Image: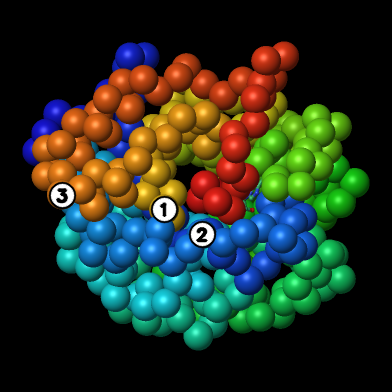
Amino acid sequence: MNAPLVDRFGRVADDLRVSLTDRCNFRCTYCMPAEGLAWLPRSELLTYEEIERLVGVFLDLGVRTVRLTGGEPLLRRGVEPLVSLLAARGVPDLSMTTNGLLLAEKAEALAAAGLRRINVSVDSLLRHRFAEMTRRDALERVLDGLRAAERAGLAPIKLNCVVVRGTNEDEVVDFARFARATGYQVRFIEFMPLDAEEGWSRDRVVPSEEVLAAIDRVHPLVPVDHGPEPARVFRFADGAPGGVGVIASVSEPFCGDCNRIRITADGQFRTCLFALEETDLRRLLRAGADDDQIAAAVRDAVARKWAGHRINEADFVRPARSMSMIGG
Ligand code: SAM
Ligand code: SF4
């Protein structure tokens, strides 16, 4: 194995997000416009062989966690064989983030292919509000998908809930109750300025402290050691199953401990969600670069990784691509 990917601040990058597509079957208001976002041409997407090869290079550079994402990863045709290829590569921790719409029909095949665990995005437990936030009336199908994931043994199941002021913050205690009833971990994510419609504003961010306080008043919480992940994680003090996590990217940035790196669906390497610079790995692959040359380009980019996002600074500049095109 090559030396691990260390940046100039001593952070080790060992958690890789791989976006499989920029397309989606939802149109979450905090992520995509209702219409009008141009899709990447198919020829620009990395093929499964290219993804497998890149993941091999990253494993050799010390990556331990690979999370498939998008856009909606389950929209990419033949995703199960890709999971098999990556599982056969020996990825120590292989997971996926999905909106769950196609999970009911795919959970079993994904687990059989070697997927270990899954994060499913659910922003409301109310049908009409779910439909408003995702612009699709699909809550029931997503809940079916969750049950299918459970039956298939994809565990632990984590829910991702983006909390947006004036939209769904009144549901955080209901989500905690749902976690207790199902054993899932519900992770509340602060709204970040990565929405394509640029509707983000600071007053629409619900600070994670506020979410935790609201839940703790009803169901007291106890912090749990969460290792290197950015979520702060809690269990219920009364021993009920499930748990709560918060990802306070805006109010309490965790950039100092960031171990994440990303490959977009079109093969651009990014060292931060908010990075303004990308490294074109697809061009290298298609120009016949060998694994050492690709590893060198990745190492260079990681070395240049910045200290952290500047959302809270006056000079903050949004990246040119929004969340669904980067891969969250
Ligand atoms: N389509 C899949 C899904 O929704 O789970 C995977 C891709 S999605 C971009 C990954 C995660 O990013 C989801 O949990 C989504 O809620 C979150 N996300 C999208 N836009 C966001 C934003 N502006 N701020 C915070 N989280 C966001
Ligand atoms: Fe699609 Fe996920 Fe973005 Fe929602 S958050 S529009 S499901 S990519």
Q: Quadrant of residue 246?
A: top right
Asked if residue 139 is positioned above or below residue 56 in the image, the reply reads: below
Label 1 crowd (10 A; few <14 / some 14-19 / many >=20): many
Can the viewer see residue 238? no
Taking the view exactly as shown, the residue that stands out farthest to the bottom is 105
Q: Secondary structure at mark 1?
A: loop
Label 3 crowd (10 A; few <14 / some 14-19 / many >=20): few
Q: Quadrant of residue 310?
A: top right
Q: Nearer the viewer, residue 70 or 67?
A: 70
Identify the amino acid type marked 3: Gly
Structure colour scheme? rainbow
Name the residue tied to disc 2. 40
Name the residue tied to disc 1. 266
Name the residue tied to disc 3. 288
Residue 295: x and y in percent read: 19, 36
> Do the numbered discs 1 and 3 sit on residues whose CB atoms are within 8 Å?
no
Identify the amino acid type marked 1: Asp
Residue 185: x and y in percent read: 57, 55
Residue in the image at 37% along x and 49% along y = 267
Residue in the image at 60% along x and 66% along y = 24
